[in-house]
Image (cartoon, rainbow, N blue to C red):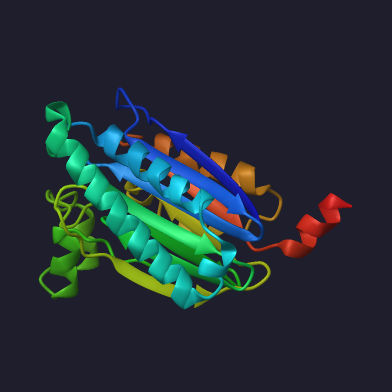
Amino acid sequence: MKYALKTDTGKVRQHNEDSGGVFTKGEHFLAIVADGMGGHKAGDVASSKSVSLLNEKWKDTDLGEVDTPEKAEKWLLDAVEDTNQRLFQHAKENKECDGMGTTLVAAICTPASVSLLHIGDSRCYLLKQGSLTKMTEDHTLVNELVRSGQLSEDEAENHPRKHWILRALGTEETINVDLLSFTWEKGDVVLLCSDGLSNKVSRETMEEMLNNDQLTIHEQVERLVSLANEAGGEDNITIVLISNDREEQEREAK
């Protein structure tokens, strides 16, 4: 497996409230994207602390604890629930952080499978056989209206309450997250991103970029960030790409 990560402030915001990380352990990767909630105090603290806390737990994890999708999902749930408690407590003890929160999408990638946890509107996509599929459902008011048939997809794109988050990490003592696992094969790519990308670059354009085999995985990330900025760049942008390409990795090592 190979990976690329980039986080960018964008063209409008004064500071970056996004955080991201990819942490390796043997052939297992833990990938994370967190987007500190806009309008909340210390959103950047919430996102960066969530990434660092999960990394701390990952460092102490034996691979036997995450060697099946079921175990990986349990690890993610336990780790994120503990992280939520610690963020919530930090906000209670530090007045300047009162009300802070963050979205989170985290994936444990093994050579055979990906286990995913998410809360909020940061997303995961899977590129398989050239087709890009969104694997997560946004926890937003507008997405709930779409799912219930009250709004169309087109109406949702320009809805004034598009950014209203219904679930986040750190804002409540308990959380409700989504968990899923799926298999992947050589040539598949997992994309994690904050809404700074998904609100500005269409799924079709992402798919086209990830299918461009003239670009390295790092160049694909750079181009996607540039496209989001060219479309306005009003928000912070964070992208993680992980490619299941073990044969190429083995050739490069020789």
Q: Tell me where residue 45 appears, x and y as whole percent.
A: 29, 33
At x 37%, y 51%, the residue is 198
Q: Tell me if residue 123 comes above or below residue 233 in the rendering.
A: below
**Side of 161 where 51 appears, left or right:** right
Q: Tell me where residue 103 appears, x and y as whole percent.
A: 28, 50
Q: Tell me where residue 47 appears, x and y as whole percent.
A: 32, 40
The quadrant of the picture occupied by the N terminus is bottom right
Q: Tell me where residue 178 appears, x and y as whole percent.
A: 30, 68
The answer, for residue 231, to whether it is visible in the render is: no
**Side of 147 where 122 appears, left or right:** right
Rendered image quadrant of residue 154: bottom left
Number of marks drawn: 0
Which one is nearer the viewer's eye here, 196 or 190?
A: 190
Rendered image quadrant of residue 127: bottom right
The answer, for residue 165, to whether it is visible in the render is: yes
Q: Tell me if residue 41 comes above or below residue 131 in the rendering.
A: above
Which one is nearer the viewer's eye here, 27 or 131?
A: 27
At x 50%, y 62%, the residue is 108
At x 19%, y 49%, the residue is 163
**Side of 220 where 186 appears, left or right:** right
